[in-house]
Image: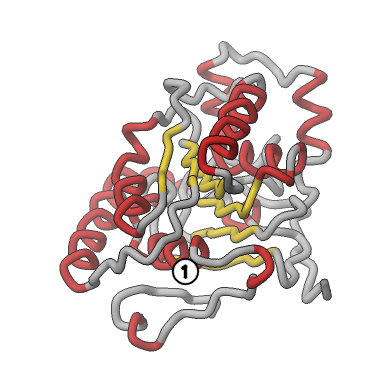
């Protein structure tokens, strides 16, 4: 696969404080836009039924991804929550998710697509690097895999809920290789209005035919509810690895969703 460009991630700053402080308000705007989108857009259940695992972000749980999973089911797929309670950033959860994915692949006789929001997207990439034969594709929603250790408020929240505990040696080793791309089709969504993690930390460093970065408009907390996220997810889930091609927005959707980078 031909490399198209290299995304520079050195000296990534923290998101603007104004974006952080307005995150809760902007979530409501994202939800309002989603309501308008659902009224104007007809969902076609054309999915092939393959399993789709949705992993929440830090401090999130399956309730926070319920609306997204309901959408995936309407498309004609079999969505699953991670079923591990609140995501507290425990690296051991990756092993539990691997066991779950193995069971889903056996149950459906199909590879599993992963949708990971924020830290959930970091987990998804790690899973695909460990067991690529289980994974059909990855879609990350504002996942800071290019700069997990610094430059974002999610790291500060992580240390706060873990009583200031620094990263363990295992976690540091994991972080050192976290920017390496997964050997499966990967779509990384990011927003320049993100108030939790800097948008440059949510991009593949070397995008190519299998690894695409897509800019959308919205808040970090609203990522699973932004209409543009749904449009990308619908388009990507229908593709198998052998048919993979970069996402392009359809003209008929240009009045309903925003894709500044496309």
Disc 1 target residue: 235
Residue 262 to residue 189: above or below: below
Q: In which quarter of the image is residue 211?
A: bottom right
Task: Report the residue that reaches farthest toward the bottom.
Answer: 251
Asked whether 196 or 170 is in front, the reply is 170
Q: In which quarter of the image is residue 209?
A: bottom right
Extreme-left residue of the structure: 39
Quadrant that contains the N terminus: bottom right
Residue at horizontal 48%, vertical 46%?
52
Task: Answer left or right for 191 relative to 25.
Answer: right
The residue at the point 23 percent across, 71 percent down is 42
- From this viewpoint, is residue 230 visible? yes
Tell me if residue 75 comes above or below residue 259 in the rendering. above
Give the mark count. 1
Q: Which colour scheme is used?
A: secondary structure
Q: Residue furthest top?
A: 163
The residue depicted at 77 percent of the width and 53 percent of the height is: 183
Element under disc 1: helix
Q: Is residue 18 visible?
A: no
Q: Which of 7 and 3 is in front in this view?
A: 3
Of residues 25 and 34, the one nearer the viewer is: 34
Could you classify mark 1 by the number of other residues whose Cα lies within 10 Å: few (under 14), some (14-19), or many (20 or more)?
few
226 relative to 66, above or below: below
* Image-quadrant location for residue 98: top right
Is residue 147 shown left or right of residue 59?
right
Q: In this view, does 172 lie to the left or right of 217?
A: right
Q: Residue at left 41%, top 46%?
A: 78
Give percent across and percent down for residue 82. 47, 30
Residue 193: x and y in percent read 45, 58
Percent across and percent down for residue 246 are 62, 75
């Amino acid at each position: 696969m031909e490399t198209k460009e290299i995304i520079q991630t050195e000296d990534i700053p923290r998101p603007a404080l104004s974006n952080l402080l307005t995150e809760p308000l902007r979530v409501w705007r994202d939800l309002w836009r989603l309501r308008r989108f659902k009224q104007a857009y007809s969902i076609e259940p054309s999915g092939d039924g393959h399993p789709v695992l949705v992993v929440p972000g830090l401090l999130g749980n399956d309730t926070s991804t319920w609306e997204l999973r309901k959408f995936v089911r309407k498309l004609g797929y079999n969505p699953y929550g991670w079923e591990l309670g609140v995501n507290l950033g425990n690296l051991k959860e990756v092993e539990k998710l691997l066991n779950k994915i193995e069971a889903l692949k056996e149950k459906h006789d199909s590879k599993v697509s992963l949708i990971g929001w924020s830290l959930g997207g970091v987990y998804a990439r790690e899973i695909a690097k460990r067991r690529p034969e289980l994974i059909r594709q990855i879609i990350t929603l504002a996942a800071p895999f290019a700069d997990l250790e610094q430059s974002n408020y999610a790291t500060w929240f992580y240390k706060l809920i873990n009583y200031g505990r620094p990263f363990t040696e295992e976690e540091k080793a994991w972080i050192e290789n976290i920017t390496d791309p997964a050997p499966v089709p990967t779509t990384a969504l990011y927003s320049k209005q993100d108030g939790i993690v800097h948008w440059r930390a949510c991009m593949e460093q070397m995008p190519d035919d299998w690894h695409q970065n897509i800019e959308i408009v919205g808040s970090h907390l609203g990522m699973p509810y932004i209409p543009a996220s749904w449009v990308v997810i619908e388009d990507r889930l229908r593709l198998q690895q052998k048919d993979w091609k970069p996402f392009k927005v359809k003209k008929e959707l240009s009045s309903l969703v925003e894709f500044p980078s496309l």
